[in-house]
Amino acid sequence: DEIRKVVATVPDAQVLSDLDATIAWASQSAKGDSRRVAITGFCWGGRITWLYAAHNPNLKAGVAWYGRLVGNTTDLTPKHPVDVAAALKVPVLGLYGGKDTGIPLDTVEQMRDRLKPSSSQSEIIVYPEAPHAFFADYRPSYRETEAKDGWKRLQAWFQQHGV
């Protein structure tokens, strides 16, 4: 719970900049192939996955696991995934739980609608019986079937998009 307090104080702009710096370091150090960069994230990281895919059009793909799609606009969080969806160029696969009490299905549908005019070919999968954090095998919310299916979809998505 301590990490939540820290994460809540970090501006999105800093997170996106930190990710840019990480990719630059990997590229310059020859420890990574900057032509095959992808991103995935869970919960808070799922939201960042959508935002970073909009920020960095050089990504090959992204997979967002139950990342919040809407929210209040603040200095720390000036935009949310629904705000950047229409302009998205990077293909992002969104994996969501139909029983997620923190991410209402109407916001998932709103995101789907906002993605339609984009050229990203992004997709959203909803697992009807899954709650939030269905991939977290250390929590009661873990759902093995959905988690394994999501992982297979992540691997196929990244392969399909050249990662």
Image (cartoon, grey):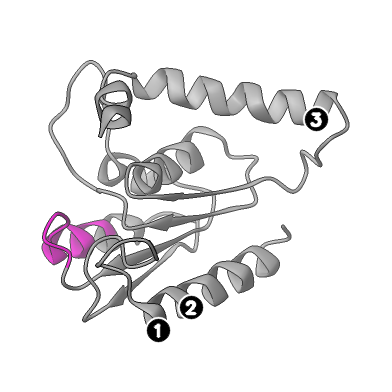
Rounded to the nearest angstrom, the CA distance separating label 2 from label 3 is: 31 Å
Q: Amino acid at mark 3?
A: Ser
Query: Helix or strand or loop: what does disc 3 sit on?
Result: helix
Mark 2 lies on residue: 148
Name above or below for residue 26 compared with residue 110. Answer: above
Q: Residue at x 56, y 28 (%)?
A: 19
Residue 106 within the segment the image draws in magenta: yes
Residue 69 within the segment the image draws in magenta: no
Q: Is residue 160 left or right of residue 48?
A: right
Q: Is residue 96 left or right of residue 17?
A: left
Mark 1 lies on residue: 145
Quarter of the image that includes the N terminus: top left
Query: Decide: marks 2, 1 in contact (CB < 8 A)?
Result: yes
The one nearer the camera, 75 or 9, is: 9
Q: Residue at x 27, y 40 (%)?
A: 83
Q: Nearer the viewer, mark 2 or mark 3?
A: 2
Q: Residue at x 52, y 71 (%)?
A: 151
Please state the extent of the stretch shown in magenta in the rendering: 100-111
Q: Count neighbours of disc 3 (C-alpha within 10 A) and say few if under 14, some if 14 to 19, many if 20 or more.
A: some
Mark 3 lies on residue: 27
The quadrant in which residue 65 appears is bottom left
